[in-house]
Amino acid sequence: MGTPGDRQPPRYGIRARHTDSTVTVYQAYHPGIGRVAARDGRFPSSWKRDRMTWIKPSFLWMMYRCGWGTKENQETVLAVEISREGFDWALRHACLSHHVPALHGDAAAWKRLLKQAPARVQWDPERDLRLNPLPHRSLQLGLAGEAAARYADEWIAGIEDVTPLAAEIHARVRAGELERAAALLPEERPYPLKGDDLAHLFPR
């Protein structure tokens, strides 16, 4: 664990905790789903496969979204380790969640792509320890249909309940101990992207 580097990251770039074979993403759920998933290493039958599920490689963006695990139905924060092969597949088959004329042409063409894609990408401002927005963007990856099924059934290598970690970091932040809080953060490094096959995900 540690803090990001001092250099300003690119405006659009994927930073994540990753190994040679896996990448860690974050989600937050009601304890009835989250605790069971962490215990069993897979999502329970109550997990809805027919809904889009959003995964986030950024721990701090997840903290912004779930309020450090205090928001209703987001009390259990999960670190889900998935295969890089699956993550890369989702990126290759994703469409941006907003229309970019330079990438998509007219809006109708973009809407057709969005409707057909099993995954979508949204870029939102990354957050600092106080959850204030930063100049660079953080990836959110939405999975639906085939992508959601593959995520649940094929890609997951492990699920960890990191709610206690979120609470500890939050306590340090509230106490004004930002250096101690930063030292507890998962180490997120630039995620290697292969060739130009993901150019459709980066606005320009």
Image (cartoon, rainbow, N blue to C red):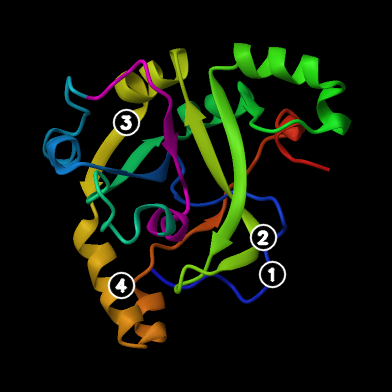
* Residue at horizontal 72 percent and vertical 58 percent from the top: 10
Rendered view: 68 above or below 45: below
48 magenta-colored = yes
Instruction: Indicate the secondary structure of the residue bearing disc 3.
Output: strand
Q: Is tag 3's residue or tag 4's residue first in the polypeptide sequence?
A: 3
Q: Mark on residue 8? A: 1
Label 3 – label 4 distance at C-alpha: 26 Å
Label 3 – label 1 distance at C-alpha: 31 Å
Q: Which residue is mark 2?
A: 136
User: Within 10 Å of the Cα at label 1, are there few (<14), some (14-19), or many (20+) other Cα atoms?
Assistant: few
Rendered view: 151 above or below 171: above
Type of amino acid under label 4: Ile
Type of amino acid under label 2: His
Horizontally, residue 165 falls left or right of residue 2, namely: left
* Residue at horizontal 48 percent and vertical 59 percent from the top: 188
Label 3 – label 2 distance at C-alpha: 28 Å
Q: Mark on residue 169? A: 4
User: Within 10 Å of the Cα at label 4, are there few (<14), some (14-19), or many (20+) other Cα atoms?
Assistant: many
* Residue at horizontal 57 percent and vertical 59 percent from the top: 126
Q: Is tag 3's residue or tag 1's residue first in the polypeptide sequence?
A: 1
Check the picture and name the quadrant holding the N terminus.
bottom left
Q: Which residues are magenta?
A: 47-63
Instruction: Indicate the secondary structure of the residue bearing disc 2.
Output: strand
Horizontally, residue 195 falls left or right of residue 160, namely: right
Q: Which residue is mark 3?
A: 156
